[in-house]
Image (cartoon, rainbow, N blue to C red):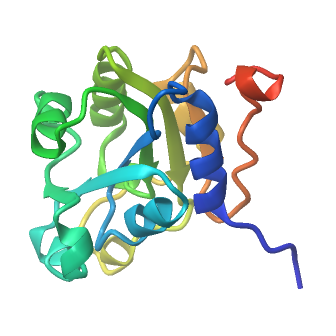
Amino acid sequence: MGERFDKVREIAAFAEAVADADREPVVVVAGCGAGATVEQLREHGVTAYGFDASQSILETAEPEIRERLLEADIRDEDLIPSLREAFGIDAIDVFVTECMLSFLSLEEARETLARIRETDGVGTLIHQVRIDPPVAAQEGEIDATILPPAEWQSACDPDGEDIWRDALERLDLPRTDAEGGDAN
């Protein structure tokens, strides 16, 4: 039937390993929807926040998690300062794009991710990419950019600074220096 794995636990452990030892790790989830990943990360001891461009989806979040979510678009040039102000955080140890890059063109993704990557206080970017089109794209309501992780990386991250994974497969995050390996 297949091996059971917990992506959220993997992200939490990775964040714990790359964060400063004197504080809880901070993870921000882009395309968080109703905040399920944010809530699960918190259950694993991570300070987690999320944002999504869809106000209607955010409104479906449970009240206790809603205060940790923000309506924002990843393409906003002031995204990171807005997140810092809204959530009262200085550093983001792990920035996760959760199955949302397909809503961007390659050029938008390239520019946006470069800007986030170059922002002081933002650590590792992890991209979970779906290779099946979103329902809205299947129904012809939106255009979608559907590429496997390696092609996204080639187009948006040719230096291999980020971590790119198929959202339907195990993350298998790299070992960090704290664990006896390299973070990328």
Q: Is residue 148 visible?
A: no
Which residue lies at the image location 37% right of the left edge and 36% below the top edge? Answer: 106
Question: What is the x, y in percent for residue 125?
Answer: 48, 33
Badge count? 0
Question: What is the x, y in percent for residue 151?
Answer: 59, 37
Query: In the rendered view, would you say 62 is above or below 71?
Result: below
Query: In the rendered view, would you say 97 is above or below 144?
Result: above
Question: What is the x, y in percent for residue 130?
Answer: 53, 60
Q: Is 105 positioned to the left or the right of 129 in the image?
A: left
Q: Which corner quadrant holds the N terminus?
A: bottom right
In the image, farthest residue toward the front? 22
Query: In the rendered view, would you say 181 is above or below 127?
Result: above
Q: Quadrant of residue 92?
A: top left
Which residue lies at the image location 31% right of the left edge and 14% below the top edge? Answer: 120
Which residue lies at the image location 71% right of the left edge and 61% below the top edge? Answer: 169
Q: Quadrant of residue 77?
A: top left
178 or 152, which is in the foreground?
178
Q: Is 53 positioned to the left or the right of 130 in the image?
A: left
152 or 46, which is in the foreground?
46
Q: Is residue 66 visible?
A: yes
Which residue lies at the image location 53% right of the left edge and 53% below the top edge? Answer: 129
Q: Which corner quadrant holds the C terminus?
A: top right
Question: What is the x, y in percent for residue 23?
Answer: 44, 33
